[in-house]
Image (cartoon, rainbow, N blue to C red):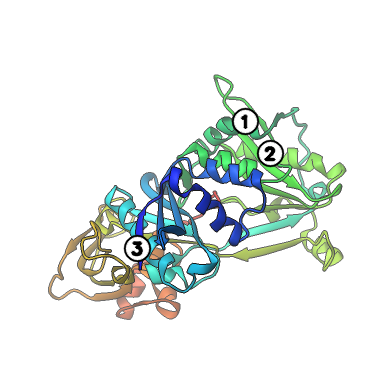
């Protein structure tokens, strides 16, 4: 018999430390203090076995940039189960309850990072876009501008860094996690992390920076976070990265939204051939390691303002999360029959309209469609989405969105 309840810092902190040790997310006492910082803000739930917490899930409030609007988002920031509580269904049930509470509190969508594709599909999540991690020699950057000496940043500058992340250049699909403890814990978690940036704000605010770690004297250097407010600041940061090329032989970084890093690299294919299978291999790796789901269908669609002719259709929507929720849960998922309107003004209303084409979809697939991860025709081939071919083709023309990229790992 298990009990699900809110995390109690006085009662559950030692159990939280033990859970994270058993799944090797922390391995010494100093990292326990870092976990305490991480748990200091946001929502957290535990599942008890024999009056001891054995499963812990957490979430943080956030903002999702959808086209030109900011929407309330929940980020599930951790799901951890102890060694003795595996295969009991606790992680799914606890995460479902967390999503329901966040949705009831006003989050219209939820997102998380995944350890493997498939598990969180069971809670209605759909896989996001590929993120490109590019590895290159900083000396090969085609930037010749003279840079200004940057400001050195450390763990103590977490408030400046968090503010800079929240005020970075907006783009479709961007995620901004609001509690400061998130950035503070991430900075202290990176071993030997350092930052370089510029405080060009009117009151000395950090306008653009990157946070990195080195592995060895010559690298590789990994850029874990980057923020800027315009293209000039981005190019200045890349020029700053180039200066590291006097010593560092490889930079690894996630390609920013709207940028094709290959444009800035001299002889990219030559570099890949020469460095193949070496410690300093130049390579571009793609991986889709985040997922998102809609929690409030009408609210999400009301934020959808498209430069397209109005399209109306019926939607038969399924949502697997309801099987993990208690009957008295304040939110029961998004399953149902709806009439969808897409266009300059979009909406979802309950019930079918007669003589409308019907789209059948799981919530994960429809979330991907709404966010712009994939086209209707593409998703109909690989995901839980189907409908008349004419409707799928019309959706391809109507929901033509930029690729969504969170720009913040979680």
Relative placement, left or right, of 113 versus 399 is right
| Mark before the other along the chain sequence, 1 or 3 | 1
| In the rendered image, the vertical position of residue 251 relative to residue 118, given as above or below | above
- Tell whether label 2 touches label 1 (CB within 8 Å): no
Image coordinates for residue 92, horizontal then vertical, percent: 40, 67
Please tell me the numbered disc located at residue 237.
Answer: 2
| Mark before the other along the chain sequence, 3 or 2 | 2
Residue at 44% from the left image edge and 52% from the top image edge: 58
Relative placement, left or right, of 336 versus 120 is left
Residue at 48% from the left image edge and 56% from the top image edge: 404
Q: Residue furthest front?
A: 50
Residue corresponding to mark 3: 398
Using the image as rendered, state which of residue 72 and residue 254 is in the foreground: 72
Disc 3 versus disc 2: distance between alpha carbons? Answer: 36 Å
Mark 3 element type: helix
| Mark before the other along the chain sequence, 1 or 2 | 1
Mark 2 element type: helix
Relative placement, left or right, of 94 versus 299 is right
Q: Is residue 403 visible?
A: no
Image coordinates for residue 356, horizontal then vertical, percent: 18, 74
Q: Residues within 10 Å of mark 2 (few under 14, many from 20)?
A: many
Q: Can residue 233 be seen in this view?
A: yes
Residue corresponding to mark 1: 157
Disc 1 versus disc 2: distance between alpha carbons? Answer: 18 Å
Image coordinates for residue 291, horizontal then vertical, percent: 46, 62
Q: Residues within 10 Å of mark 1 (few under 14, many from 20)?
A: some
Image coordinates for residue 315, horizontal then vertical, percent: 24, 71
Mark 1 element type: helix
């Amino acid at each position: 018999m298990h009990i699900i309840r809110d995390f109690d810092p006085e009662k559950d902190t030692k159990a939280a430390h033990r859970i994270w040790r058993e799944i090797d997310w922390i391995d010494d006492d100093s990292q326990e203090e870092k976990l305490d910082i991480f748990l200091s803000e946001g929502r957290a739930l535990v599942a008890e076995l024999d009056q001891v917490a054995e499963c812990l899930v957490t979430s943080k409030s956030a903002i999702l940039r959808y086209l030109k609007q900011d929407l309330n988002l929940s980020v599930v920031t951790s799901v951890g189960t102890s060694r003795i509580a595996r295969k009991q269904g606790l992680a799914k049930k606890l995460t479902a309850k967390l999503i329901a509470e966040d949705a009831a509190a006003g989050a219209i969508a939820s997102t998380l990072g995944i350890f493997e594709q498939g598990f969180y599909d069971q809670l209605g999540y759909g896989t996001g876009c590929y993120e490109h991690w590019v590895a290159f020699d900083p000396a090969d950057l085609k930037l010749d501008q003279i840079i200004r000496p940057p400001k050195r940043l450390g763990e103590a500058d977490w408030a400046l860094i968090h503010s800079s992340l929240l005020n970075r250049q907006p783009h479709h699909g961007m995620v901004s996690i609001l509690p400061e403890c998130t950035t503070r814990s991430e900075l202290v978690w990176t071993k030997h992390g350092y930052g370089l940036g510029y405080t060009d704000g009117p009151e000395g605010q950090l306008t653009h920076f990157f946070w990195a770690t080195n592995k060895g004297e010559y690298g590789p250097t990994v850029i874990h976070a980057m923020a800027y407010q315009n293209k000039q600041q981005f190019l200045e940061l890349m020029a700053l990265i180039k200066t590291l090329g006097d010593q560092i032989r490889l930079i690894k970084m996630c390609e920013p939204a709207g940028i094709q890093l290959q444009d800035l690299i001299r002889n990219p294919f030559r570099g890949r051939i020469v460095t193949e299978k070496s410690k300093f291999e130049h390579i571009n790796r793609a991986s889709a390691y985040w997922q998102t789901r809609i929690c409030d269908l009408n609210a999400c669609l009301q934020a959808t303002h498209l430069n397209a002719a109005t399209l109306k259709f019926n939607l038969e929507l399924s949502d697997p999360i309801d099987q993990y929720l208690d009957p008295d849960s304040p939110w029961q998922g998004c399953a149902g029959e709806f009439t969808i309107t897409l266009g300059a003004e979009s909406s979802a209303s309950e019930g079918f309209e007669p003589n409308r084409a019907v789209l059948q979809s799981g919530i994960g697939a429809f979330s991907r469609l709404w966010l712009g991860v994939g086209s209707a025709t593409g998703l109909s081939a690989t995901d839980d989405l189907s409908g008349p071919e004419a409707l799928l083709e019309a959706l391809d023309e109507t929901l033509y969105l930029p690729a969504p990229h969170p720009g913040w790992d979680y």
